[in-house]
Amino acid sequence: MANFLLCSIKRADKPYPIPTLGIGIYSAEELCYYMNHYLYLLEDNFVCEELLEFLQSELGLAALVSKIRRWVDGRSDMLQIIFMIEQDIHYYTDGELIDLKQRIDQLRQATKAERAKLRADFYLEDGRPMTALRVYEKILRGEYGEQIGRELRCKVLHNAGVSYARLFEWAKAMECFVESCHWGPNEDVLKQMYQLTLLDDLVEIPPEIFSAISSAQQFKWKEEFDTLYRKAQHSGKALEAHTIMDKDSVRRGEGLGRLMGEWKQEYRVMVRE
Amino acid sequence: MSGLILGIDLSDDYCQIACFDPQVMDAEQVSFAKDDDNCLIPTVLCKRKKMDQWHIGEEAYSHALCGQGTVVDKLIRLAGKDGKATIEGVTYSAAQLLSHYVKRLIEIPIKKYNNPQIERIVFTLQEENIEVMDALVKIGDSMGLPREAVHVATHSEAYLYYVISQQKEIWANQTCLFNLTERGLHYYELRTLRGRTPNVVEVSHEMLEEGFSLDILDTESGRKLADRILLSCADRLLGRKLVSSVFLTGRGFEDTGWANESLQYICNKRRVFAGQGLFCRGAAFLAYDYGLPQSAYPYIGICEGRLQSTVSMNVLHEGRSRQLIIAAAGTNWYGARANIELIPDKTDVLELMVTALNGDRRILRVDLDELPVRPNKMTRLEVVVSFSQAGSMTVRVFDRGFGDFYPATDKMIRKDFAI
């Protein structure tokens, strides 16, 4: 079983710009990664003349471009073209391409609002909760054309709540969870609401919802929360901070300065719209 | 007009040049002067006094004898030791001196064929020496030749290509070569190992202990002694073998009158060829073959200077698993450098397979755990495989990042292997 992909396609001298990420694409493999990983962010005009020109002149993929142009003649399906490119470059395995195909099919069948939710979910997972929140709010305001269904509304509200929580806005997070519950009660949402109260005791669950949570469940969820909390104290950012505090005064100062800089940068990305 | 295809045999005593003619598919030895059949050019360099003028060969001796210049000899040995020489208060590196010599040497065929273009050169040396080989390649660079137009081969390789370029009956069975020079008596043996696809042609080489100084050929008793020595060697080396042809070359065989008894023995049921220029002509044949998209010879050549094993690795290309040949057995090790770019998929070990001609295989591993940790398939590696001799391979792995997603670091992993 081969575990190394041979890179036989040349790298570009002039990269293909991706303004939304502020980067350039230099290789066919990077392009495949970008299209797959950021599938939900791709605009309808992503496959454009400039991209085809890049594929042909910078990456030397004249045959692929020719195939695309023949296919496009009379038809226009950006998602299908993306899949053609992915298949041709072979960056992903057959199994990974099947997953991609499923996501493409899901996207193709989705309504505008559903596509927007997928995009917002991506932003949320990508560490950009503020950007995600703006899209969730647009969905809830009906800015994607059609009336959204109960199930979708419930999910969007929940994810908006998660976005607020990641921005440390506990009260707003609770409001979203509560409204999500009204549209469709869900044990996971109840758990998150309960654990939110453990993070900030100023935040409260409305009595009519709180009464639906049994003592046994509360006990179990508290235990889970305590375990996660203890783990968090000794890993990730907390561990990093502890490690720096153990150093001598000079290195501690330098370390804390660097850490604060990193955290500030992360926060700026999180709150960027 | 296409450029000259040259084979140049370099040694500390004299050099020889051959030029391949694609019209007749043969290599012709080039003489030093127009009306002179002498094809042996002394490896001597002379700098004219108070001038930036350099002369080689007999001209160098002439100028030195007239007191018009300073002579430097043993240029190959000097280059091999990365030595220096001081002439008129200026210190010159061995590489510089060799460069002056070689450039003037190459002017000979340029003038003879009235063609200033050089398409390809193969230099051939008695022994592999990385300093000399590097110096020769750099001379090619300084002449504006592309790197792939300059090659260095051993005498074994040159002999191999000379023989397989001859008519088949000459090497239907084994062939042998005795090369007698001031540097000693060298013996080469070529045989074809049949039953493999493609066939393997193997050349072995040894420097015979019985070698003698050519000075002894100046006396009658010395000549008789030399004859007995050669006869003894021939009996020992050829005695039980089926040999089609024997080649005698080198300064010692310019005049074969001293070797009556040994020649009587050697010529018995064998074809014998005596003459100069075998190595440079073999190098010229090799030079022509290097210029072809695919070798014209359906053989794998195994000898000094050539890899004895194939180095390969399993890769995914266009969705299919393939065995990528990094360096093939029979390739000249000096030019066998490979440069490939790979993306690892759920692995942190690079595995190379080394396959010997007899089919034995082993796996060589390079751990990649020192490289930066990134998500799967988001690291591009540049793998450089090079050889410092036929049995020593160096693998270097460079982190090339993943575009702007993950910029490259300066991390490099190096591992040396004996193969």
Image (spheres, coloured by chain):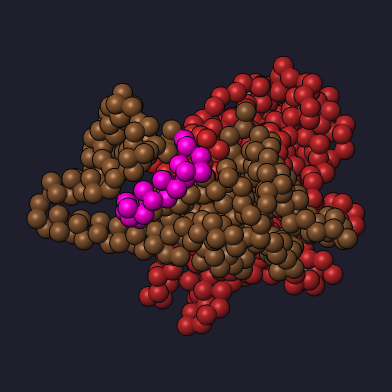
Q: Position of residue A61 (x, y in %)?
A: 75, 57
* Chain letter of the red region: B
Q: Position of residue A84 (x, y in %)?
A: 75, 49
Q: Position of residue B261 (x, y in %)?
A: 72, 28
- A205 magenta-colored: no
Q: Position of residue B202 (x, y in %)?
A: 70, 30
Q: Quadrant of residue A19?
A: bottom right
The residue lying toward the viewer, choosing from B331 and A148, is: A148
* Chain letter of the brown region: A
Asked whether, in this view, residue A1 is left or right of residue B241, the answer is left
Q: Quadrant of residue A51?
A: bottom right
Write the residue at 82% across / 44% down.
B296
Q: Is residue A82 visible?
A: yes
Q: Which residue of the protein is positioned furthest toward the bottom in this rendering? A: B50
Write the residue at 64% across / 54% down.
A147
Q: Main secondary structure of the magenta part?
A: helix
Q: Is residue B151 visible?
A: no
Asked whether, in this view, residue B383 is left or right of residue A79, the answer is left
Write the residue at 65% across / 38% down.
A99
Asked whether, in this view, residue A44 is left or right of residue B97, the answer is right
**Rendered-image quadrant of the C terminus of chain A:** bottom left
- A180 magenta-colored: yes
Q: Which residue of the protein is positioned furthest toward the front in this rendering? A: A208
Q: Quadrant of residue B223?
A: top right
Q: Which residues are magenta?
A: A165-186
